[in-house]
Image: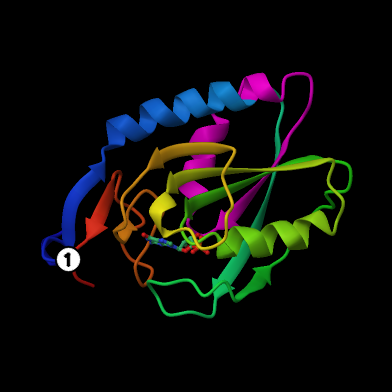
Amino acid sequence: MADQSAALGEVLVSAEAIARRVAELGREISADYRGGTPHLIGVLKGAWIFMADLIRHFEIDVTVDFLSIASYGDETESTGEVKITKDLDVGIEGRDVLIVEDILDTGRTFQYLSNVLLAHQPRSLKLAALLDKRSRRIIPVQADYVGFEIPDAFVVGYGLDYAQKYRELPEVRVLRSP
Ligand code: 5GP
């Protein structure tokens, strides 16, 4: 832990606040999809911890898959130029798809992903994002389910990384200096 202390700034969302909100979202999503079986697509690697916690609060059947993407941009700014490095395992035609993302920032990644997924003709396509940096939006997209709106800061923890580090933190913290 000693080498983390200089790089990590304030706690923006505590582990307790995350647990409460994720449970609420699980119940809300279950109510919205009642009678159906949504197909959750987690965007690796950032969304894996959020998705694992989220589905444990579902009160309906759910199926899951994962997409892995790599951004061509630098490490703290997405360019929206995304390459799929792990494709879906099962088809989504006719399914109620819910993309699960760690964070919605400029909106470019979601725009790219939704275009790719819509081409496979799901019955519906929605987005759940743990974090939303609304003030940074360049593409006018909105998540259907948002855990927390946060200010414009680069954050790590609860699955989110900087250079593959800090995913293990139970809370979301500002990265002060890489
Ligand atoms: P967008 O394409 O919406 O600008 O960015 C979405 C992606 O950029 C996220 O899925 C995430 O990988 C990355 N990203 C954006 N903001 C942050 C941040 O504050 N921290 C981390 N770790 N990743 C971020």
Please check the rendered image and state whether residue 41 is part of the magenta-colored stretch, yes or no.
yes
Give amino acid for label 1. Ala
Q: Quadrant of the N terminus?
A: bottom left
Q: State the residue in front, 74 or 86.
A: 74
Q: Is residue 130 above or below residue 29?
A: below
Magenta region, residue range: 30-59
For residue 41, side relative to residue 77 (left or right): right
**Is residue 133 at least partly visible in the picture?**
no
Q: How is the image coloured?
A: rainbow
Crowding at dot 1, Cα within 10 Å, few <14 / some 14-19 / many 20+, comes out as few
SS assignment at label 1: loop
Q: Position of residue 2 (x, y in %)?
A: 10, 62
Horizontally, residue 115 falls left or right of residue 111, namely: right
Q: Position of residue 151 (x, y in %)?
A: 31, 51
- Image location (x, y in percent) of residue 137: 48, 58
State which quadrant residue 7 falls in.
bottom left
**Which residue is pictured at 59% across the width and 76% down the height?**
81
* Image: 144 above or below 59: below
Residue 93 inside the magenta-drawn segment: no
- Say if 62 sits above or below 51 in the image: above
Residue 126 in the image, given as x and y percentages of width and height: 67, 42
Quick check: which quadrant has ligand 1? bottom left
Q: Is residue 169 left or right of residue 39?
A: left
Compared with 160, 30 (above or below) is above
Does residue 76 appear to the left or right of 67 in the view shown?
A: left
Q: Quadrant of residue 178?
A: bottom left
Q: Which residue is mark 1?
A: 7
Residue 97 is at least partly visible in this image = yes
